[in-house]
Image (tube, rainbow, N blue to C red):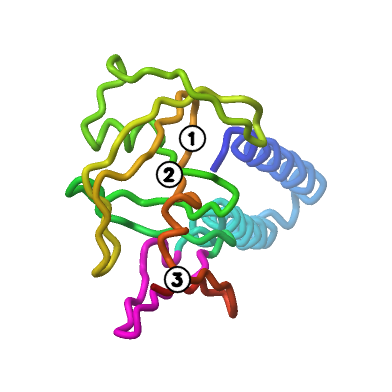
Amino acid sequence: MENNDFVRLIYLSILVAVILASILMTRSGEFGKLARQAGVWLLIFMAVVAAVAGWEDIRQAGPTTLFQNEESGRIIIPKHNDGHFRLELTVNGKKIEFLIDTGASEIVLNQQDAKTLGFNEKDLEYWAYANTANGRVRLAPVRLNTISLGGYSEKNVKATVNEGEMRASLLGMSYLNKFNAIEIKQNQMILTR
């Protein structure tokens, strides 16, 4: 739940409390019956608030790194509930989750994943640039010793580390072009070797 959602929740809670208090003052003779009804409505309201607060987590739950590797050389990746394709690859022996981005030219690591892979931020040289939807960003070119997906492994793979803030690392076309075909149908991405 974000800050704005929390503020709205507090506002709505205060509003409901004021409405209930005004009703209680106007019906002082029927206090017992009214208190039971107010309690029931309060429970319903709290259940709705809890459902709304948890909806984002429920909506984002789902397959994020699952894929099916077929003997035919096809890798089938299900679409995540947020509408994106995500994939977990083994990079330099470590599991890294990527957002598949056909609009990205390269593999782009966020700061956290770069650190996980052993790249020291102080040693990175940010001399390359990329134009993104959020403006121009600086990139540090790096080399990945190995990157593996299913039974496929690549060595000495070019990548970059984004100097700015990114939620997920991006798996761009430099890696996806290693496949003979990329197909999207029925909420699945199919990579074929």
Q: Earlier in the sequence, mark 3 or mark 1?
A: 1
- Image quadrant of residue 37? bottom right
Residue 164, compared with residue 23, is above or below; it is above
Report the mark closest to the observer, 3 or 1.
3
Q: Which mark is residue 166?
A: 1
Location of residue 162 in the rendering, given as x and y in whole percent from the top left corner: 45, 29
Magenta residues span: 62-80
Q: Does 79 lie within the magenta span?
A: yes
Q: Does 14 lie within the magenta span?
A: no
Amino acid at dot 1: Met
Residue 7 visible? The answer is: yes
Report the mark closest to the observer, 1 or 2.
2
Q: Quadrant of the C terminus?
A: bottom left
Q: Which mark is residue 107?
A: 2
Q: Secondary structure at mark 3?
A: strand
Q: Secondary structure at mark 2?
A: loop
Residue 47 visible? The answer is: no
Amino acid at dot 2: Ile
Q: Which mark is residue 191?
A: 3
Name the outermost residue toward the bottom: 72
